[in-house]
Image (cartoon, rainbow, N blue to C red):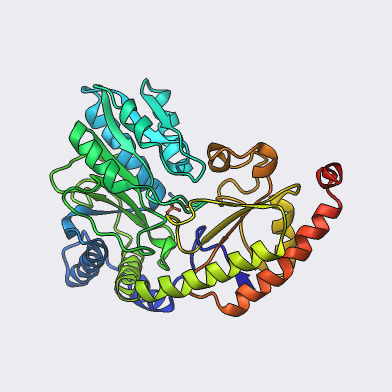
């Protein structure tokens, strides 16, 4: 099997699994209890928090564990909306956010909040002029993702953070696709809140975190036993916390070398596809793009058909985000960068990771031109074009 869907999820690093194992059956105690095994579990939890903080260069106290990136996004946005409702009910986001952000915004619109969806240019970069012009006296939050999961474009979050600070507006960024994948250091002048997900950087699924900058406070969305300093209740998921902590530690040590290797493989693959398949569009920013991501539209055919053919060859890829695969609507991200419905329908996302090899790249590059050619031969659009 060739797995090239690392933006959807990554396999757990074996060292991560090893780190997690004792916390299932041996060191299983509830961190809220007072006996020794509970104190040991609590120690593992705090070590994990330190590791995640170490990766981001922030304080352990600024990391709050959640069930994943989706919960972190929901909490940052709905929590800020709750906290700031006296000041205003206006939120700014971009048109290309993940559904964890967009659907939270939509839900708030039903409750009387107003949301501005700032457009992006053809590379997927947020229009900074429009963003600035959208800020009003009643604006309470700007939420713009760090890197896009479909096309990989990286947003200028430092600039957005400065603008938000200057205007007295909170800034949240969904950094699910960058934490553990790209160097990212949080500073005083950076975002107020940042979402993290364990399974995107070789950690387990069902665990994530929200970074909340010291001095910033939002109310909880989940009430109960008062875990996570009363901010996010629920019995601590120690195995997954330990796993994400280990993944963070490994990322800190090995990220640089992984980046250069994966970038090289991605570039080789992209160049081979460009040389082997005519009539394609490469999406995303030419430079400011995740080093592992290729998003291509193959004109005149359907992305879903390409995926099925790749699957038949033992290759796992995606036609957009995992969540939109299976839906008949083309990706909102591809429409936002200005592609027509027809072209957007032919999208293929190949996202590489640290376990990919040169053989994987060669396999994909060798089968893809044949697949595209065969699908075009039976496509009415291809015949019309000729
Ligand atoms: N945000 C982005 C940009 C993502 O790519 C994803 C995962 O697909 C999420 C949020 C959701 O994260 P999780 O799967 O941890 O809930």
Residue in the image at 31% along x and 36% along y: 142
Q: Residue at x 63, y 41 (%)?
A: 330
Q: Quadrant of the N terminus?
A: bottom right
Q: Which of 122 and 134 lies nearest the eye of the viewer?
A: 122
Q: Is residue 311 visible?
A: no
Q: Which sits in the foreground, 192 or 265?
A: 265
> In terms of image quadrants, where is residue 32?
bottom left
The total number of labels drawn is: 0
Q: Tell me if I can see residue 296 in this picture.
A: yes
- Relative to the observer, which residue lies in front, 66 or 192? 192
Does 382 sit left or right of 26 as displayed? right
29 left or right of 16 in image: left
Q: x, y percentage for residue 125?
A: 43, 43
Q: Is residue 312 left or right of residue 169?
A: right
- Picture quadrant of residue 28: bottom left
Eyeballing the image, is 94 above or below 210? above
Give residue 300's position: percent from left, percent from top: 76, 47
Image x and y of residue 46, in percent: 20, 65
Left or right of 347, for residue 232: left
Residue nearest the observer in this picture, 358 or 46: 358
Which residue corresponds to the image point at 68% horizontal and 40% vertical from the top-left?
328
Q: Is residue 287 above or below residue 276?
A: above
């Amino acid at each position: 099997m060739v797995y090239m869907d690392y933006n959807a999820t990554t396999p757990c690093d074996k060292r991560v699994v090893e780190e997690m194992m004792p916390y299932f059956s041996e060191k299983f105690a509830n961190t809220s209890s007072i006996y020794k095994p509970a104190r040991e579990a609590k120690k593992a939890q705090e070590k994990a928090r330190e590791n995640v903080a170490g990766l981001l260069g922030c304080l352990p106290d600024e990391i709050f564990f959640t069930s994943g990136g989706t919960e972190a996004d929901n909490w940052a946005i709905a929590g800020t909306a709750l906290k700031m409702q006296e000041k205003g009910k206006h939120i700014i986001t971009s048109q290309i956010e993940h559904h964890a952000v967009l659907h939270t915004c939509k839900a708030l619109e039903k409750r009387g909040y107003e949301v501005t969806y700032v457009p992006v240019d053809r590379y997927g970069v947020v229009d900074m002029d429009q963003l600035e012009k959208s800020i009003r006296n009643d604006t309470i939050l700007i939420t713009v993702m760090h890197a896009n999961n479909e096309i990989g474009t990286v947003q200028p979050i430092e600039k957005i953070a400065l603008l938000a600070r200057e205007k007295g507006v909170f800034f949240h960024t969904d950094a699910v696709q960058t934490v553990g994948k790209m160097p990212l250091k949080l500073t005083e002048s950076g975002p107020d809140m940042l979402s993290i997900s364990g399974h995107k950087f070789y950690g387990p699924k069902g665990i994530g975190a929200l970074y909340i900058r010291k001095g910033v406070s939002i109310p909880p969305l989940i009430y109960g036993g008062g875990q996570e300093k009363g901010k996010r209740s629920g019995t601590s998921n120690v195995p997954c916390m330990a796993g994400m902590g280990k993944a963070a530690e490994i990322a800190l040590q090995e990220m640089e070398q992984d980046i250069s290797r994966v970038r090289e493989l991605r570039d080789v693959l992209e160049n081979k596809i460009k040389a082997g398949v005519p009539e394609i569009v490469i999406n995303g920013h030419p430079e400011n793009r995740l080093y592992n991501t290729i998003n291509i539209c193959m004109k005149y055919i359907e992305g879903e058909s390409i995926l099925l053919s790749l699957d038949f060859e033992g290759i796992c890829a995606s036609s957009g985000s995992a969540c939109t695969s299976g839906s008949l609507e083309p990706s909102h991200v591809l429409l936002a960068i200005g592609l027509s419905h027809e072209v957007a329908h032919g999208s293929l996302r190949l996202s590489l990771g640290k376990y990919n090899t040169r053989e994987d790249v060669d396999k994909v590059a060798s089968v893809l031109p044949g697949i595209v050619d065969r699908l075009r031969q039976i496509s009415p659009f291809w015949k019309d074009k000729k």
